[in-house]
Image (spheres, rainbow, N blue to C red):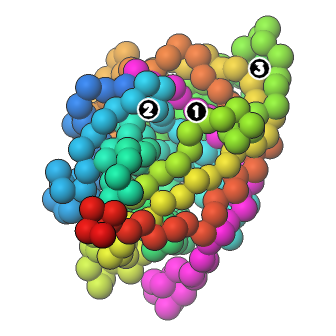
Amino acid sequence: MSSESKHPKAAPGAWLNRGEVYIFFLSTPGEIPEGAYAPLEARSYFASPEAGTFRGGLGAATVQVVRYTDSPAGPYDELLYIPGRFDNPSGKAHLRITRIYVSTDASTYNGRKNWNIPKHVARFAFTRIQPDSALSPVKIEVFPLSPANSSPFFSAVATPSSWAPNFPFNSRRLALDTLMVHPPVPSQGPDAYSMIGTDRWVSIRPCLRGKAEIVWYTPGGGGSEGVQPGEYADGVEFPKFKAWRFGVHVKDLVLDFPEGDVVEDKKTK
């Protein structure tokens, strides 16, 4: 294995990413569900009560599936879960990604290093069910990294609306709350270079913009293993969730991801 493959290239923020994103709006859970943290983070400060009480928040919970065709770390796919807002050292409650998968080591390394985003690597599959139709449903599946495991832990079908027109989407102009504050992430050890750890809190306010369409979501589960019928996720590798029937697919996505700011603990001042 080459040193380059063992050690992904550093790509400091800010980032300007391009691609597309499917946004699932969720019913905010009353408590953190099973599978909301990867085992590495679950046994660390990142998921501890000391890292902030979960506050939920109306409209704050989302699942997002992103296909980046261009980023400073190269193209990659992404699946993330935001259960809502958490207390943090700023003295307020803000959004936090608790579980996230990406398709490359480069994205994993830089997401953890730059912004404390607890990324892990997985395999992604996107299948157009009716390839010749502009309104073809798209089946989205995410699998464990090992090719030996053929059962997805996340499965959903997104069907574009046949009647709703496209519309401009800009998270800043729509006054959407995108401010996230993340605790330090743990390291997996020196033999897992991309799974780097950090030692400070970081805040980030991304801005999403592009052309959007309404899509209808249905659970893709149905196999004897992995995701069960009527579910989007297996509840182990990714949390089960209740999604709104409709969501948003932002095409021609441009994502501004700033450098990030270190958050100081106001309670100690």
Residue 100 in percent (x, y) is at 42, 51
Q: Which residue is mark 2?
A: 61
Marks 2 and 3, the one that precedes in the sequence: 2
Magenta span contains residue 263: no
The three-letter amino acid code for the residue at tag 1 is Ile
Q: Residue at left 31%, top 47%?
A: 87
Residue 258, above or below 247: below
Determine the secondary structure under disc 1: strand
Quadrant location, the C terminus: bottom left
Viewer-nearest of labels 2 and 3?
A: 2
- Find numbered disc 2 in the image and state the secondary structure of the residue it sits on: loop
- Residues drawn in magenta: 1-27
Q: Quadrant of residue 128?
A: top right
Q: In screen coordinates, is 262 left or right of 251?
A: left
The amino acid beneath tag 3 is Leu
Instruction: Name the residue that disc number 1 marks.
Output: 23
Q: Position of residue 5 (x, y in %)?
A: 51, 82
Report the Cα–Cα distance between label 1 and label 2.
10 Å
- Disc 3 secondary structure class: loop
Name the mark on residue 135: 3
Q: Is residue 25 magenta?
A: yes
